[in-house]
Amino acid sequence: MYAVALGGNTVILQAVRLEPNLHQPMYYFLSMLSFSDVAMSLATLPTVLRTFCLNARSIAFDACLVQMFLIHSFSMMESGILLAMSFDRYVAICDPLHYATVLTNGVIAGMGLAVTARSFVTLFPLPFLIKRLPICKSNVLSHSYCLHPDMMKLACADITVNSIYGLFVLVSTFGMDLIFIFLSYVLILHSVMAIASREERHKALNTCVSHILAVLAFYVPMIGVSAVHRFGKHAPRYVHVLMSNIYLFVPPVLNPLIYSAKTKEIRRAIIRMIRRIKT
């Protein structure tokens, strides 16, 4: 899974960088998504490999805090990028004449910076909220990486502030992103239904399939792991482990497969890259 995630997303990044016909807003956003997937995989890779390959099952507390911050930050970045991609599809379908003037390189760069800044600013307090808690129950984590809900359960003090802030972050960022993505597709569907030609309607909707699949691959596991952590306290331990692994590993693996399979421009660019390497 790591090989597919790192290899597949790196190939897409290289394709967008090298192919001039991919220097368009849709593919710039795709390269941002691939970058966040690579970063997410690299954030979990050290402890996962140490745990399963070297049987090294300990991590320094401060290193755990850093990993927790990086995992949650890149996850939030991915959510923001998926929202930006839905805006790209909305403008492309609902206002195609102004597509090039609305989504300029400056606007795309600004959206990327805003997504990154939101992740950093929103999650910056998390390590400090964990560090203030005394850990005196157990020092055994449920996963082979550090997550905020898992770490705060080790505390023997009141974790109400952590729980409330965690829920606030979840609702105000991931929740709002999902609502706006849904609204953008309601508007897209309304615009598409107004197209007289059935073939044109199908063509317009087909450009959204990859993004819809990427949204489902990201949000369904995330909602599942959040529900298990908050409402499945009596669920078997393996359920928690399985859901968290799906949440962190599935999107980076599926995204390059989805976009290379469903987007012919990406497929052609990858084939051209392979041919250049062979020659």
Image (tube, rainbow, N blue to C red):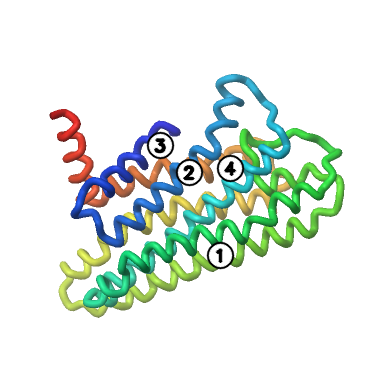
Give the alpha-carbon distance from disc 4 to disc 3, as whole Å: 19 Å
Q: Give the residue drawn at x 45%, y 48%.
A: 36
* Helix, strand or loop for disc 1: helix
Badge 4 crowding class, 10 Å Cα cut-off, few under 14, some 14 to 19, many 20 or more, is many
- Mark positioned earlier in the residue sequence (2 or 4): 2
- Residue 244, which numbered label? 4
Badge 3 crowding class, 10 Å Cα cut-off, few under 14, some 14 to 19, many 20 or more, is many
- Mark positioned earlier in the residue sequence (4 or 3): 3
Give the alpha-carbon distance from disc 3 to disc 1, as whole Å: 28 Å
Q: Position of residue 216 (x, y in %)?
A: 44, 55
Q: Position of residue 96 (x, y in %)?
A: 24, 74
Disc 1 marks which residue?
175
Give the alpha-carbon distance from disc 3 to disc 2, as whole Å: 9 Å
- Mark positioned earlier in the residue sequence (2 or 1): 2
Q: Give the residue drawn at x 33%, y 45%.
A: 13
Disc 2 marks which residue?
39
Q: Relative to 194, does residue 87 appear above or below in the rendering?
A: above
Q: Relative to 222, does residue 144 appear above or below in the rendering?
A: above
Q: Circles 2 and 1: CB distance less than 8 Å?
A: no
Q: Quadrant of the C terminus?
A: top left
* Helix, strand or loop for disc 2: helix
- Residue 6, which numbered label? 3
Of residue 18 and residue 3, the one placed in the foreground of this image is 18
* Dot 2 amino acid type: Ala
- Mark positioned earlier in the residue sequence (3 or 2): 3
Q: Is residue 58 left or right of residue 247?
A: right
Q: Give the residue drawn at x 16%, y 67%.
A: 199
